[in-house]
Amino acid sequence: MNLDLFVLRSAKRDIAEADAYYAPYGKADAFLAALDQVFMQITDRPLMYPIIYEDVRRALVRRFPYSVFFVLERTRAVVLAVHHQHRDPASRPRRREFR
């Protein structure tokens, strides 16, 4: 399966925040590379990631405490959020909200 990837604006903000956090430590490039790896795996093998709520799936970012939450559509995977794993679980996406 080779899906297109669509990242919601809110998820892009999550990524920018994490990037800004890691930049002073010199780890921003490593974080973005790890995130790109997850995105490639999501588009190639999306079904390998567990469903955690309704149709929302979660992929873990290697070496960084972040999760990528996404849903599958017919021809694409839609990234809803990129959250730090120690963040309040109530703030995680539970349903599709396209804003």
Image: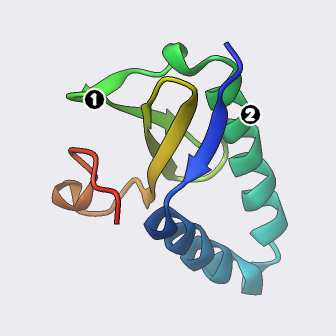
Tell me the quadrant of the picture where the N terminus can be found.
top right
Q: Disc 2 on helix, strand or loop? A: helix
Q: Residue at x 56, y 21 (%)?
A: 46
Q: Residue at x 50, y 14 (%)?
A: 47
Q: Which residue is identified by label 1?
A: 52
> For this view, does 30 lie left or right of residue 44?
right
Looking at the image, residue 51 lies above or below residue 26: above
Residue nearer the viewer, 37 or 74: 74
Residue 40: numbered disc: 2
Q: Residue at x 50, y 47 (%)?
A: 79
Residue nearer the viewer, 26 or 71: 71
Q: Residue at x 67, y 35 (%)?
A: 4
Relative image position of residue 76 (x, y in whole percent):
57, 32
Which image quadrant is residue 98 in? bottom left
Mark 1 against mark 2, which lies toward the viewer?
A: 2
Relative image position of residue 52 (x, y in whole percent):
28, 29
> Which comes before the other along the chain, label 1 or label 2?
2
* Rendered image coloring scheme: rainbow
Relative image position of residue 36 (x, y in whole percent):
75, 47
Crowdedness of circle 2 by 10 Å Cα count: few (<14), some, many (20+)?
A: some
- Of all residues, the one furthest to the bottom in this rendering is 24
Residue 25: numbered disc: none
